[in-house]
Amino acid sequence: MSPLTWVGLGCLLGVAAWLRLLCCRGELWLDEVWTWDISHKMTWPGGLFYQLQEENNHYLNTLMVWLFRNGSGWWYRFPAAVCGVASVWLAFRLGRTASILPRLTCWLAAVLTAGAYLLVHYSSEARGYAYAVFFAALAFEQLWVLESYRGQLPTTGDTPRSKRIAEWLFPLACCGGFLSQPIFLTCFGAMVVWLFLRLQKQVSADQLWPSLMRLFLKPGLFFVVLYLVDLRHAANGGGDQYPLWRVVVETLSLTGGGPFNGWRAFVVAGLVLAIFIHGLRALVREGDDRWIFLLLVVVVMPLGLLVVLRRAEVYPRYFLIAVFFLIQSAAIGLSDLYRRGLVPRVLASVGLVCVMFGCGQHVGQLAEVGRNQYVPILELLAEREPSSTIQIRSDHDFRHPLMFRYLLPQANMRGKTLIHVNHENVPAEGTEWLLSHSLDVDWTPPASREVRGVVYELQSFRPYAGLSGWGLALYQRATPRTDVPAEPRGGQSR
């Protein structure tokens, strides 16, 4: 690459890092705090594989949280941000191998990956999804390196250096993907099927299976062992349930910088799907069989895995690897439009600007509002509560107490004690305070609400940016208090 290309790529990686580190600020949300909580069960790094047995245990991410356990939440998120920036570099490298205008495709792929809201969002939180995207991109990039040497006769007796590196880096990347998050299985399966179909046309029958085994046997066995030792015992923590079609539309819309819901989300989702399909068609016309891999990894494998597992809880993050490779196909589709004349070129440019603008708005909202805002709520409670003990009930006896446990040390509680009263232990007259939450990004809490005959009035509302976390509404009992509340009955959590 030329010096100017290196400078431009360095600037782009700097912007990608800035966006992700900007969004690393703010409070951790439930799943991150949950990881922090279960990591305390570990007595040594090997405990990842038998001491936790939680679905929330994304091995590499949990290890990072355990290693930085005495640090702030920003440090928990930092490794994911590094993976996110590295994924931009890999998108650039993959784009350089494109069969359509590779010099343009690599920049389109890198720019879209750097600014894609979903990729920025999940590479700025302490979860395993950004790790999985990085290893998926690395694995496929190294697999393509190996494939580019297939059938070539060496000009010297030495194996090319890039091939030697790929021969050990590919299985390591696959193992890293499985240690990141089980969604890597969608990429692994897509690579297996794609290479099987590819080799059927290139090698004889007696060479087909040995070639596949040489590449996929070791990482495949690694996953089998991982499944038998731990994954099959992992407890499903549950969660909110949404129709699959709604999650797919939301994912496609957010990939294109569109809204979370509404008719505009359907429009943006349709346009994103159209440019993805156009990219596949362009590859077909060029005789590039990577369209098969892209179709498998973006559509067939993610949806097929959800059907096989009968997963009830589905979220956009489960499609994050699919989003990364959808962007690669979209970059190819845009490049194809750029070579087709003035009108297609203008349409591609307008679409690109709209996508980056929409994603920028979402990223800005995430950086400003964050995933949740418990600390301001806690400090308001400490300010408004006249007694030394704050009694609060909530609409969820698991989520809020866990968040309190992590965030209370970060709030200025003015020396006061917070007691969360579980649902079954709330007295007939209620508690002084009520905390409510909603995952609806457009939520507007009512000014007052009645719970078991007790009326509460809204005191504070804290919205959130969407996807991870939730909005919070703090209510106070409307009836005036005549004395300091007594200690609640047993079963409360501190």
Image (cartoon, rainbow, N blue to C red):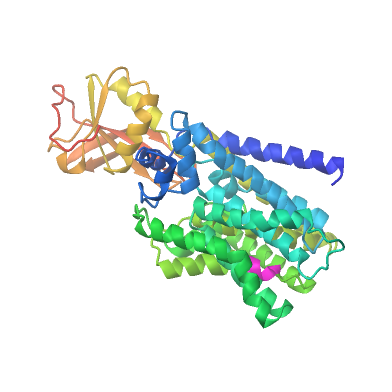
Q: Nearer the viewer, residue 480 or 160?
A: 160
Which quadrant of the structure image shows residue 474? top left
Find residue 372 and report its horizontal and vertical position in percent.
Answer: 43, 37
The answer to whether residue 219 is above or below residue 237 is below
Which quadrant of the structure image shows residue 272? bottom right
The answer to whether residue 482 is above or below residue 235 is above
Membership of 255 in magenta stretch: no
Find residue 107 and report its horizontal and vertical position in percent.
Answer: 76, 50
Q: Residue at x 81, y 68 (%)?
A: 152
* 119 sits left or right of 463 in the view: right
Q: Nearer the viewer, residue 347 or 243?
A: 243
Which portion, as a residue range, is magenta?
Answer: 290-296
* 477 sits left or right of 400 in the view: left
Quarter holding the C terminus is top left
Does residue 361 appear in this view? Answer: no
Q: Residue at x 61, y 50 (%)?
A: 134
